[in-house]
Image (spheres, rainbow, N blue to C red):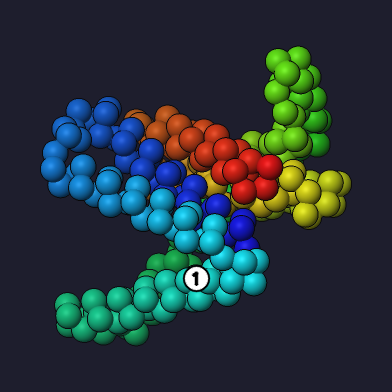
Amino acid sequence: MWQKVCRCVITLFHCFDHHLFYFIVQKIKIFQPVIIAWIAGISAIIALLVWFVSTLSTVGINIFSEQLSTGIILLIFFLIVLGGVYKKINVFDAFIEGAKGGFEIAIKIIPYLVAMLVAISVLRSSGAFDLLITGMKSLFGFLGMDTQFVSALPTALMKPLSGSGARAMMIDTMNTYGADSFAGRLSAVFQGSSDTTFYVIAVYFGSVGIKNTRYAIPSMLLADLVGIITAIFVAYLFFG
């Protein structure tokens, strides 16, 4: 589906922006042959992917996206096994140890998880999102801009707080405007275009006692903003 392709393209932009921010704040010289070659290579892959998908029919897009996603998962599996063989690690024993550690971490993050979910529930029930969306729609309408994308913004605004909350917003948008509407498709793209920034900070940083997040929050929010803007642009490109 086009939504899968859009999310793939936007994810690449999202990762690029996130790392570029760290290059700038840490004063790392980015104008080096190796870095420029990587950036040019990734940009070329994005351009080729968009061009190739644009030449396919709807059936071809579905087949290509399914095969691509399945192939990537299979490739990751083989890379893990081959890495374990190369490093002479018992992959199964390492997996069991990781599972044990995962259970302990799950217990640690429960208090932070409960606090975050309660805060999200209060925010959704307060009507703040409805007020914000109404104001933004009036503003963009006053500026003479198309306001179709505003109806899908609750998904984008909720995503940094909660993945499940953003999914609920996406379903609500699809139920209201239709799954095949522009707002419905854009909300699906938003769902995979940014990360759960504050959820990650509150739950995972809090569970290991990290108080000084330094550049984490600004860089993640900047990456989310770039993901949202790119999602709107790509959605208009494919669905507008």
**Going by the image, does 234 lie left or right of 50?**
right
Can residue 19 be seen at all in this image of the molecule? yes
Identity of the residue drawn at 80% across and 25% down: 134
Q: Is residue 126 above or below residue 161?
A: above
Residue placed furthest toward the front: 55
Q: Nearer the viewer, residue 111 or 45?
A: 45
Amino acid on which the number 1 mark rests in the picture: Ser
- Residue 124: x and y in percent read 76, 37
Q: Position of residue 218 (x, y in %)?
A: 42, 30
Question: Where is mark 1, residue-wise?
Answer: 69
Residue at point 77% right, 54% down? 180
Quarter of image, res 140: top right
Residue at 80%, 36% (x, y): give it.
125
Q: Horizontal and vertical percent for residue 211?
A: 39, 35
Quadrant including the N terminus: bottom right
Quadrant of the image occupied by residue 146: top right
